[in-house]
Image: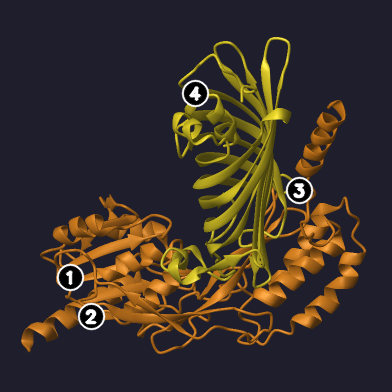
Chain colours: A orange, B yellow
């Protein structure tokens, strides 16, 4: 009987023992991390073809540089890999580590700034109110409503917009300023834009990278903007202001607003960032963010290069007023006059 | 579960075991990260059993073998780190199920063997702190499973013991399988479109445990070790979870004759 007991116990222990069968990723060495980064982007980044980037050449150029880096020299590795990904000229490509975040500035360098916060704050917003992520006030002697949305990290929801529009009920038109708005949550961009649509509308398309090849994409998937749940829609003139630093979700907002009722886009060319970013981890724990989902406008044009405004207005920042806001006010007055004279 | 078969002979009509678990967890979710995450887990669970027929009726039939039905509810939470401990993955898992066992009793050796079908429903949500636009991943599965086990009862000086080994694995069901490129904006809109048929060829789960129940005069306690393994994949993405945990529990027993113990057949 003792043998039976021993046999049973040994059998049970053997059955409970386990082994791990996880697949590994590359080695946590400079070359291992570089290869993982390069291959990840090679398979998952979505703009190689559109930007005519020879990614294999980038690989060949950087292999000798990375080979000279010692494992303990993490700063040199970080800087080298940051330079490598900056070849993509994409503000949505970053490497995140515990000590630094790489960034690409080239996509907005060389463009007019078209923005002076002090002028906007002191001359136009003045005693502004804040509703969600929106700063707002009336300008031009109460004839025009002005909303500044600095980021889509914070929502400007239905309730917020209901109060804002209530305070603009005497206004002839409305300015939505998204200059310097670096983006955030796409849903918030949709929510704000929905205020200006009477019906559900197809405002763009998405396309996923669904294979390893640079041209492996899913079919275009229409993106529907749902009409706002607010009881009323703003149908008077709207002018959306943008500059080169209007990026990512804000760039998408500008793209959407081109299909809104009675709306004009004004300012400089927006920054782009039309690729929705996803992220991936390297063997050393750094995270790389990259554009992976291509976004198009409703005419199926890529919005990655930025949106060209309906009315191009550059502000050389030489005066005490914001030339783009002033131009928008004039446009609203003109539109309102034309509307009422009809 | 096994207690059911054994305990039926000792007049137990219903038994419920409350268990706490603590152990290690290994997770891989290539929707969120290619790296293997390791960390700790805690859990609380309840297991109950009940014979289909009362012992009095069994006795009249002159038969000890019988069907019993069993149920289980588990809630587990784990927090795991990537190899450089720079990112964290949190996971909350809920698992429940119901099954039926046919129990063979070999009274002269104190041994029972059982086998039966089991319907398992499990779901979990995972949150990765550093993932852009898809920080959350889901585990969802409904599956028909098979379970089997063996127990051996013996007496100590003042206590009676029951050693039990049990395993359960999936046969066929449905699960949720995201596409790598799906952002979380789309994830919730297209959950139904991502549900697929899952069987041993593309989704393997294994739960097995070794437990020792100790019956003292006024209470029954359990200690044990439990191993859970779940692995599935598709489209160059792999998902796996492995947990090894220590189990401590106590039993609430409702029986006709409280003086009988594990070894009373």
Q: Which residue is mark 4?
A: B253
Q: Nearer the viewer, residue A36 or A324?
A: A36
Of helix, strand and loop, which one carries label 3?
A: loop
- Mark 4 Cα-neighbour bin, 10 Å: few <14, some 14–19, many ≥20: some
Q: Nearer the viewer, residue B206 or A11?
A: A11
Of helix, strand and loop, which one carries label 2?
A: loop
Q: In the rendered image, is residue A321 in sight?
A: no
Instruction: Tell me if label 1 and label 2 are in contact, CB under 8 Å.
Output: yes
For disc 3, the chain is: B
Q: At 59% from the left edge and 69% from the top edge, which residue is drawn?
A: B180
The image quadrant that residue A140 belongs to is bottom left
- Mark 2 Cα-neighbour bin, 10 Å: few <14, some 14–19, many ≥20: some
Q: Position of residue B217 (x, y in %)?
A: 58, 10
- Mark 1 Cα-neighbour bin, 10 Å: few <14, some 14–19, many ≥20: some
Q: Which residue is mark 2?
A: A261
Q: Which residue is mark 3?
A: B83
| Real-space CA distance between mark 1 and mark 2, rounded to the nearest whole angstrom | 10 Å
The image quadrant that residue A186 belongs to is bottom left
Q: Which residue is mark 1?
A: A233
For disc 1, the chain is: A
Query: Is label 3 or label 2 in front?
Result: 3
For disc 4, the chain is: B
Of helix, strand and loop, which one carries label 4?
A: strand
Q: Position of residue A223 (x, y in %)?
A: 39, 77
Q: Is residue A56 left or right of residue B150?
A: right
Q: Are marks 4 and 1 on the same chain?
A: no
Look at the picture and state if A201 lies above or below B20. Answer: below
């Amino acid at each position: 009987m003792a043998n039976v007991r021993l046999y049973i116990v040994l059998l049970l222990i053997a059955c409970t023992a386990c082994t791990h069968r996880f697949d590994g990723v590359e080695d946590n060495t400079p070359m291992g991390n570089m290869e993982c980064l390069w291959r990840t982007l090679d398979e998952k980044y979505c703009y190689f073809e559109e930007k005519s980037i020879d990614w294999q050449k980038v690989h060949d150029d950087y292999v000798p540089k990375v080979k000279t880096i010692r494992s303990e020299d993490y700063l040199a590795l970080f800087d080298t890999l940051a330079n490598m990904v900056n070849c993509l000229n994409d503000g949505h490509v970053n490497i995140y580590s515990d000590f630094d975040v790489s960034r690409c500035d080239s996509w907005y360098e060389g463009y007019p700034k078209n923005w002076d916060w002090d002028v906007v704050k002191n001359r136009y917003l003045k005693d502004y109110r804040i509703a969600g992520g929106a700063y707002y006030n009336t300008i031009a002697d109460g004839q025009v409503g002005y909303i500044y949305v600095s980021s889509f990290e914070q929502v400007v929801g239905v309730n917020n917009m209901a109060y804002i529009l209530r305070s603009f009920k005497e206004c002839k038109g409305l300015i939505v300023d998204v200059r310097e708005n670096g983006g955030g949550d796409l849903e918030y961009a949709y929510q704000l834009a929905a205020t200006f649509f009477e019906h559900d509308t197809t405002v763009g398309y998405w396309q996923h990278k669904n294979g390893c090849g640079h041209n492996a994409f899913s079919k275009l998937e229409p993106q529907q903007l749902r009409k706002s749940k607010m009881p009323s829609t703003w149908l008077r003139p709207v002018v959306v202001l943008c500059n080169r630093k209007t990026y990512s979700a804000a760039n998408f907002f500008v793209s959407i607003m081109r299909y809104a009722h009675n709306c004009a886009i004004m300012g400089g060319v927006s920054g782009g960032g039309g690729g929705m970013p996803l992220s991936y981890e390297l063997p050393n724990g750094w995270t790389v963010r990259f554009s992976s989902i291509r976004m198009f406008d409703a005419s199926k044009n890529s919005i990655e290069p930025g949106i060209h405004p309906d009315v191009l207005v550059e502000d050389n920042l030489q005066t005490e007023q914001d030339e783009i806001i002033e131009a928008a006010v004039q446009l609203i007055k003109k539109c309102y006059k034309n509307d009422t004279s009809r | 579960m096994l207690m059911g078969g054994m305990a039926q002979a000792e007049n137990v009509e219903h038994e419920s075991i409350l268990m706490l678990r603590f152990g290690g967890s290994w997770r891989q979710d290539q929707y969120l990260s290619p790296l293997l995450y390791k960390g700790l887990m805690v859990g609380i669970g309840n297991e109950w059993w009940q014979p289909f027929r009362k012992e009095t009726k069994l006795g009249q039939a002159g038969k000890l073998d019988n069907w019993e039905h069993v149920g289980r509810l588990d809630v587990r939470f784990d927090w795991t780190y990537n190899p450089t401990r720079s990112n964290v993955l949190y996971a909350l898992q809920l698992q429940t199920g119901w099954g039926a066992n046919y129990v063979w009793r070999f009274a002269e050796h104190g041994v029972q063997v059982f086998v039966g079908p089991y319907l398992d429903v499990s779901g979990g949500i995972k949150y990765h702190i550093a993932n852009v636009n898809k920080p959350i991943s889901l585990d969802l599965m409904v599956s028909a499973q098979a379970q089997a086990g063996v127990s051996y009862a013996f007496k100590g000086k003042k206590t009676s013991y029951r050693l039990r080994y049990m395993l359960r694995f999936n046969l066929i069901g449905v699960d949720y399988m995201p596409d790598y490129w799906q952002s979380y904006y789309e994830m919730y809109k297209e959950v139904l479109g991502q549900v697929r048929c899952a069987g041993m060829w593309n989704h393997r789960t294994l739960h097995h445990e070794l437990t020792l129940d100790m019956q003292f005069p006024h209470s029954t306690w359990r200690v044990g070790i439990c191993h859970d393994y779940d692995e599935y994949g598709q489209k160059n993405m792999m998902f796996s979870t492995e947990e090894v945990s220590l189990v401590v529990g106590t039993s609430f027993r409702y029986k006709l004759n409280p003086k009988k113990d594990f070894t009373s057949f």
